[in-house]
Image (cartoon, rainbow, N blue to C red):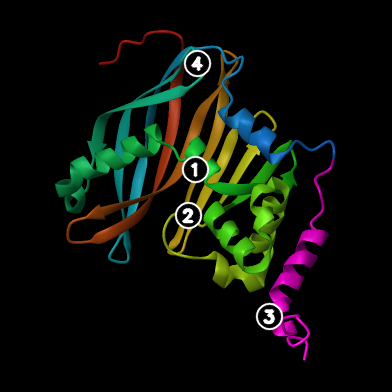
Amino acid sequence: MAELCGHPPLSRRWPALVLSAALAAAAPPLSAQPSAEALISRLFGTESRTPYELTADFSGTLTLTLRGGAIAAYAEGSFTEVRRLDGVKQRRVRITRLVLPLLLRPFRSTLQRVIEEKIETQNETPETFHAHDIFIYAEQPGGRYVLVGVHKAIVDEAIDRYGKSGDKKDDATRRRIAHWLYTSPTQREFLVRSGPPYAMRVTLDGNGTLYELTLFYDWGEVGTRISYTTVGGQTVWQHVSADASSELSGFGRVNGKLQLTFVNHCLNCKVLRQ
């Protein structure tokens, strides 16, 4: 009867009603809390960033899971981080020692590349963040914030299905929809899908310093965790823990964990390395 009167039946309107209720219930951030946009801008901002060149030594392990067991490689090398005049950071790695168990020796070049890429090309790129609608999920002690993002294509699909076309151009509405999709248990089947990361979670402080980044895929998570020390007034890496994944012939896709420690930091000085 409702459909004859020009209204869709309740079963069809129910998801839209749930979305409307979720958007209405989403509380705005406290006024003293920086916005997600401000925090991301500080992460990638290049204003008033003094150029520098930092060198350090690193050592650590790459532990892989093969055929139900764990096997580890050990690596040592040198690390250089340069912040250019435009504020952009670049990282370079030179592995000077790579100790491999017999089973991993045929994959020396592959494993060396995995270690280098995990250090030189972390996932905290503007493109990764811009692909998601990001909101502040939680505030932690010590002035840290947990941000969560849902891939924009998924938010678009939710708007197409439940919302209004004009919502796609409203950033605040998109963030509330992303929050609803991520936090609602009933939306997990809609949220999780194959392809690029369907969601991301990042922990950073009010200065934009990144402490943790996790990308969510339908097959699992890929995360990086970083702790810091201060050298000459610059915040620099001290420990890095990163999930790693690679294709090894005869084994298929292999997952593992990279654990690195950085020492002998030297800011704006040239170090002779043997």
The 10 Å Cα crowd at callout 3, few under 14, some 14 to 19, many 20 or more, is: few
Which residue is tagged 4? 86
The 10 Å Cα crowd at callout 4, few under 14, some 14 to 19, many 20 or more, is: few
Span of residues in magenta: 1-30
Instruction: Look at 71% across and 55% down and name the residue there.
Output: 176
Residue type at mark 1 is: Thr
Residue type at mark 2 is: Pro
Of label 3 and label 4, which has the lower sequence position? 3
Residue type at mark 3 is: Arg
Of label 2 and label 3, which has the lower sequence position? 3
How far apart marks 1 and 2 lie (CA) works out to 9 Å
Which residue is tagged 1? 128
Q: Is residue 11 left or right of residue 189?
A: right
Q: Is residue 187 left or right of residue 246?
A: right
Under circle 1, the secondary element is: helix
Under circle 2, the secondary element is: loop
Which residue is tagged 2? 197
Above or below, 141 against 92 in this view is: below
Judged from this view, the residue extending furthest toward the left is: 106
* Label 1–label 3 contact, CB within 8 A: no
Which residue is tagged 3? 12
